[in-house]
Image (cartoon, grey):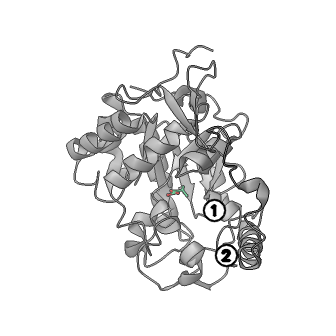
Amino acid sequence: MLRCNLPAKHPGNRETGDYFGVACPIDAYLGLPFVRRTISVFTLQSRPAAMPDQTFRPGGKSMSTSSQVRRIGVPDICARKGGEPIVSLTAYTAPIATVLDPLVDFLLVGDSLGMVLYGFESTLPVTLDMMISHGAAVVRGSERACIVVDMPFASYEAGPAAAFASAARMLTETGCAAVKLEGGVAMAETIAFLVARGIPVLAHIGLTPQSANVFGGFRVQGREDARAQQIRDDAQVVADAGAFGVVIEGVPETLGREITEAIDIPTIGIGASPACDGQILVTEDMVGLFGDFTPKFVKRYADLNADITAAAQQYADDVRARTFPGPEHCFGDAAPADY
Ligand code: KIV
């Protein structure tokens, strides 16, 4: 029976890991850029009262959000267990959220932003304030997708009360629908505490990047029987604790498949299994915005690195040749205020 639970990178360890299916230097992964109508009663997500009813749109325009688009809610995600695959990508900024919003079911404001946007070597330095700023931007830039924001390292592990304080700020200051936190059995009490107090939780198990120091790097988790059993237990326990879904990262395909069949909440795979109820990737990985290395679990659908390089090269050439700006980019003396 489907239960809907209502009221859910990377350390400086630079050892070699095999997360990508081949033994590869962890630097390669780290090197992403771096390194490496009416609102439904089901819709939990709302704009914080303090925020104006205006949404940022790329191009400097604001637009009213009193449109009739219904935002996908947590119960909609729950209802997809065993059904049409759930599509998810990360977003950290309003313009990217606006582009992705019509195409995905949920957007994750992942703490991977610490590495992808800020150039940290791990997700550990990411703060609650950073996540709130980016979470609010993604909510403002979207109108349809369900928005989930990551709880950063040290904002929830101390205990349920500390986690509630952090997660409550996340929901009230961003307008997101849910939070994601890493951990299985160890986080069960916290997940139950949050869910009982109205905070939907997406759990994250398997390779949990905030614990990569414990794992000794970014390694596929669950190849050994004992670790595989821990991950099975993690999945069952977070489901029992009330998580509405669970991200499974960096595990053997058979384990991802087995867990998806065993638990009654949606599984979202990243480096897991096509059998998962949904998939997620870091958008910058998916569009090739960073270095040449592509981790095994990533499929590149674009090469934005090359596109941006070509555009910037053309711009530089034009500026140096004084062919930009052209007359069409210049203001006349008598023109109206048409900036
Ligand atoms: O931080 C993140 O972006 C994530 C996803 C990749 C699952 O946790």
Q: Which of marks 1 and 2 is in front?
A: 1
Mark 1 Cα shell of 10 Å, populated few (<14), some (14-19), many (≥20): many
Relative to residue 307, is residue 156 depicted above or below?
above
Q: Residue at x 58, y 49 (%)?
A: 259
Q: Is mark 2 on a helix, strand or loop?
A: loop
Mark 2 Cα shell of 10 Å, populated few (<14), some (14-19), many (≥20): some
Give the side of residue 206 with respect to residue 198, left or right. Answer: right
Q: Are marks 1 and 2 in contact (CB under 8 Å)?
A: no
Residue 272 at x, y = what percent? Answer: 63, 58
Cα distance in 3D space between marks 1 and 2: 21 Å
The answer, for residue 79, to whether it is visible in the render is yes
The answer, for residue 3, to whether it is visible in the render is no
Residue 106 at x, y = what percent? Answer: 59, 40
Please state, as top left, top right, bottom left or bottom right, where the C terminus lies in the image. top right
Looking at the rendered structure, the kind of residue marked 2 is Gly
Relative to residue 206, is residue 3 depicted above or below?
above
Q: Which residue is drawn at 46% across and 33% down?
A: 177
Task: Look at the numbered disc 1 and say if its residue's Cβ is closer than 8 Å to ligand 1.
Answer: no
Residue 13 at x, y = what percent? Answer: 42, 81
Query: To which residue does mark 1 refer?
Result: 284
Please state, as top left, top right, bottom left or bottom right, where the N terminus lies in the image. top right
Q: Is mark 1 on a helix, strand or loop?
A: helix
Q: Which mark is residue 21?
A: 2
Relative to residue 179, is residue 230 depicted above or below?
below
Residue closer to the observer: 23 or 35: 35
Residue closer to the observer: 287 or 192: 287
